[in-house]
Image: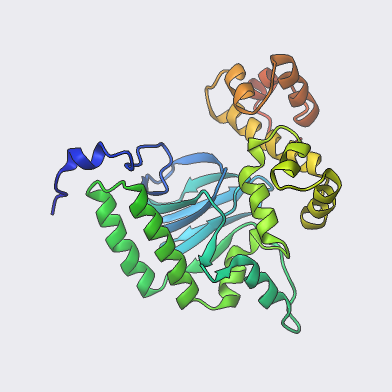
Amino acid sequence: MSMMYQNEHSGCFNCDRSEKPQIEVKKIVKGDTGILSLKENEIVFVTEGRIRFVANDFSGCEGLKGQMLFLPAGGNYSFDALAHSTITVFRFYESIRLCDNFDLEKLYEERTKRNGYRAHTVRFGILDMNALLWHYLDGLNDLIAEGVRCRSFFNVKIKELLLLQRSFYTKEELHDFFSPILSGDTAFSEYIRLRWKNFRTVTEVASSMHMTHKQFYNRFVSVFGKKPQQWMNEGRARIIHNEIISTKKQFKQIAAENGFASDTHFTRFCKKELGKTPTEVRYGKTTMGDNVK
């Protein structure tokens, strides 16, 4: 079956022609590798093959056929296809809500209040796909293969995915799947994870949330366990490191895209946070984690 009126669909302002659409099906050849620097949360469904993901702190996991993986925003990941693989990627540009009446913060509250439960920190969330999710993905992937790229459609399908998870997985399973981003103040932490790169200073972030600097500072430290500027510097350093070693972008472009007013400021930042100048990082190929926490 072929989609009718292809030109009308492709010419619509709602057609998602971006490099990173909200939902994307990707085929990866065995042996392919790459580096991901995520600015948004992603859920990756492995519908064929086997892929290894490694985070910047060197924790890793393997996604097998029939599994979904949660990759939180703000992290750098490398991947290695251990077999010919097909994945469906969902990108969340806004905070995740399982439904209108159940946000992620409730998972944290309900799971941690149970007697004998010990909270644990993981880098990846993994769940097996049930029969309903397989059916859902088969239909979605067929439509994408036919050329459907509508943002409105993608928004509906993302809501449908979250509703399926909410309805057919236990709260304990969902807690463990989303645990990399859960906290006692998930709404606050997700706002920071998804938007911090839009601001140059801690004061700007605080103002955007209608908070004083002191209010923001105290709340940030209680959630992240670090000072805001330290956390932001480390996050920006990871992004810059990844772009220097895995792209051919000129340093001026990387500097401008990351909010640096001059080459001097950019170089000074790299020397402080990465231990080397941009040129030394690119041609010396430092290992992620040597200097970036």
Quarter of the figure with the C terminus: top right
Instruction: Give the x, y percent position of residue 47.
Output: 37, 59
Instruction: Give the x, y percent position of residue 232.
Output: 73, 39
The one of 19 and 289 positioned closer to us in this rendering: 19
In the rendered image, the residue lying farthest to the bottom is: 115
Please tell me how many numbered marks the rendered image carries.
0
Q: Is residue 257 left or right of residue 214?
A: left
Q: Can you see residue 273?
A: yes
The one of 227 and 200 positioned closer to us in this rendering: 200
Q: Residue at x 57, y 55 (%)?
A: 95
Q: Is residue 174 above or below residue 7?
A: below
Q: Can you see residue 48?
A: no
Q: Residue at x 63, y 36 (%)?
A: 198
Quarter of the figure with the N terminus: bottom left
Instruction: Give the x, y percent position of residue 34.
Output: 50, 39
Q: Is residue 100 left or right of residue 255?
A: left
In the rendered image, the residue lying farthest to the front is: 210
Q: Is residue 81 above or below residue 156?
A: above
Instruction: Give the x, y percent position of residue 288.
Output: 68, 37
In the figure, residue 102 lies in which quadrant? bottom right
Q: Residue at x 78, y 21 (%)?
A: 268
The one of 40 and 128 positioned closer to us in this rendering: 40
What color scheme is it? rainbow
